[in-house]
Image (cartoon, rainbow, N blue to C red):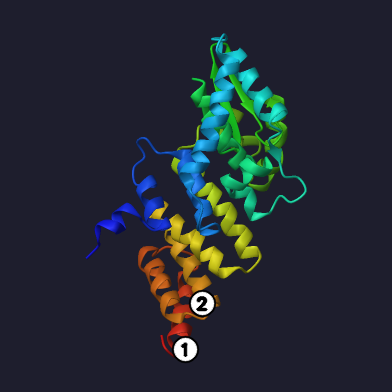
Amino acid sequence: MPSALDFLNPTPLGYFASLVKDDEGFPLLEAAAAIAQDEYPELDVQEVLGDVDQLMARLRRRCVDHEDPLTRLRILNQFFFQDLGFGGNVNNYYDPDNSHINVLLRTRRGIPITLAVIWLELAQGLGLKAKGVGFPGHFMVKVNLPDGQVVIDPFTGQSLGREDLSERLEPYKKRNGLVDDFDVPVGLYLQASPSRDIIARILRNLKEIHRTQEDWLRLIAVQDRLLILLPDAWMEYRDRGLAWAELGDAHLAVKDLEIYIAQTEDALDRDAMQRRVSELRREPNT
C-alpha cells in the first residue's frame, strides 16, 4: 500500500503522469521541463520554472508602458533572440540536450520545438495570443494580432511570409504527393498544436536520436513517457518491445509486442511482429 511519502515524493514518471493527465490547463513548460529528469534525476523542475519566471519579470518591465500587441511582440523578440541570444544549435542539432529545457536555459541553444516552448511561455505571459504550430519538419510559432497573423521560426527568430512558408513546404509536398490536384492551402499547415502534441513531438525527437544511436535504455525511458502521454499509441508498445528485445529482455519484449498485436488487427507489420514474438518465446527465461 502506498505511503503518504509516496504521494509527497512521486517518481519522475509519476510526476510526469500527474502533469499530463488532463488537457485542460495542461502545463506545457512544466511537462517539457520534466522530460529532462530521465537524464538529470536530481533536477528540480520548480527551479527551472523559477528561472523562466525571472526572465518573465525582466521582460514585463520592458513592456510596462506598451499595451499594443505588435510592440510587445517586437520587444519579446528583441529580448529573446537578440538580448538573451536564444537560437538554434546549428553545430550539434542532434544533441539530446537540445530537448532538455534546463540545459537550453543555460546554453541558450536548442531545437525549434524546445525554443518554442520557452518563447510561448513568455509570449503568453505578455498576453499575446501565441500558439505553437506543428509545421512539417520544423516547429513554428504564431501570434494573432489585430491586423493579422505573424508566423515566426523559433530557431532563427525570422518572421515568415506566405511565400517563405510555401517554399519550405515544397519538399514535404513533393515527398508526399501533395501537388497539383492534391495540393492544399498553406493555412492548413498552420493549425495550432495542442500542448499534448507538442510534448509528444519533443519525446519523439528524443526517441529518434536514441534509436539512431542504439541507446535502448534511454529510448525505453522516452517511450515510457510517450505511453503515459498517449496511452493508445500502440506503435509505441511495438517499438518499446523491440527495444526490450535488443536489450535481451524477451519477457518484457513479448509483453509489449502482444499488446501491439492485440490492438492492431489491420497493421501491415502484424504478421512480422507475431513471428518476432514466436522467436522471443523460444528464448530462455521468457
Query: In the rendered image, which quarter contains the N terminus?
Result: bottom left
Mark 2 and mark 1 in contact (Cβ < 8 Å)? Answer: no
Q: Nearer the viewer, residue 262 or 217?
A: 217
Residue 51: percent from left, percent from top? 55, 37
Residue 170 placement (x, y as % from top left) = 70, 38
Seen from the viewer's position, the closer of residues 219 and 51 is: 51
User: Does residue 143 lie above or below 255 as drawn?
Assistant: above
Residue in view at x 62 percent, y 41 percent: 105
Q: In the current view of this chain or complex, which residue is farthest to the left?
A: 1
The disc at residue 283 is 1
Between the residue at mark 1 and the residue at mark 2, the CA separation in whole angstroms equals 11 Å
Q: Residue furthest right?
A: 91
**Residue 11 appears at what percent x and percent y?**
39, 58
Snapshot quadrant of residue 10 = bottom left
Residue 49 seen in render: yes
> Crowdedness of circle 1 by 10 Å Cα count: few (<14), some, many (20+)?
few
- The residue that disc 2 covers is 245
Q: Amino acid at mark 2?
A: Ala
Q: Residue at x 65, y 34 (%)?
A: 154
Number of marks drawn: 2
Mark earlier in primary sequence (1, 2): 2
The answer to which of 60 and 143 lies nearer the viewer is 60
Residue 269, how many percent across, how many down? 50, 68
Seen in the image, is 20 located left or right of residue 40? left
Q: Is 270 placed above or below 100 here?
A: below
Secondary structure under tag 1 reads loop
